[in-house]
Image (cartoon, rainbow, N blue to C red):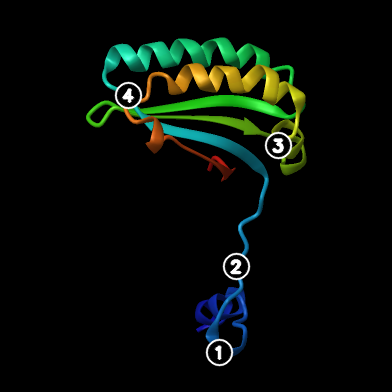
């Protein structure tokens, strides 16, 4: 009985009509690019371009790392630039560095996409558990 009472006490209170207001905390933020490449050779070429960009990114305030994931059955390629907080991410997104240094690398990367119109880029809250 004591255990049941402590579980009830630990539950968050429900807002009116049973709706809970949940928030996703924004700690780290990532800029993600996703596309499909033709094959292993194309993925390797994109890897090389990403590897060239990474040392330049290290000079950006709050830059944490580059991540990459590849699905070898679909040849889906996804890369992310991770920043330590939203303010540093926003500063990067509005920076001259991004416009003049990083975007040319993204153009080189997109040259390897099988369908340039299907390239996706967006922002993500990024966490590791």
Q: Position of residue 50 (x, y in %)?
A: 51, 16
The label nearer to you, 3 versus 4, is 4
Q: Is residue 65 above or below residue 33?
A: above
The label nearer to you, 4 versus 1, is 4
Which residue bears the numbered disc 4? Answer: 37
Q: Is residue 91 above or below residue 1?
A: above
Q: CA distance from mark 2 to mark 3?
A: 23 Å
The mark nearer the N terminus, 3 or 1, is 1
Mark 2: few/some/many CA within 10 Å (<14, 14-19, 20+): few
Mark 3: few/some/many CA within 10 Å (<14, 14-19, 20+): many
Q: Position of residue 43 (x, y in %)?
A: 35, 17
The mark nearer the N terminus, 2 or 4, is 2
Q: Which mark is residue 89?
A: 3
Q: CA distance from mark 3 to mark 4?
A: 27 Å
Residue lying furthest front: 117
Is label 3 in a helix, a strand or a loop? helix
The label nearer to you, 2 versus 3, is 3
Q: Dots 3 and 1: beta carbons under 8 Å?
A: no
Q: CA distance from mark 2 to mark 1?
A: 15 Å
The mark nearer the N terminus, 2 or 3, is 2
Which residue bears the numbered disc 2? Answer: 22
């Amino acid at each position: 009985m004591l255990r049941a009472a402590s579980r009830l006490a630990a539950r968050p209170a429900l807002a009116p009509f049973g709706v809970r207001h949940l928030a996703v905390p924004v700690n780290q933020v990532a800029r993600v690019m996703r596309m499909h490449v033709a094959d292993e050779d194309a993925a390797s070429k994109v890897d090389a371009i990403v590897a060239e960009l990474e040392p330049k990114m290290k000079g950006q305030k709050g830059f944490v790392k580059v991540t990459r994931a590849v699905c070898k059955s679909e040849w889906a390629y996804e890369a992310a630039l991770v920043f330590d907080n939203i303010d540093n991410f926003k500063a990067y997104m509005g920076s001259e560095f991004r416009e003049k240094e990083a975007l040319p690398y993204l153009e080189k990367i997109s040259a390897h996409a099988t369908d340039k119109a299907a390239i996706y880029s967006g922002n993500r809250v990024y966490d590791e558990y």
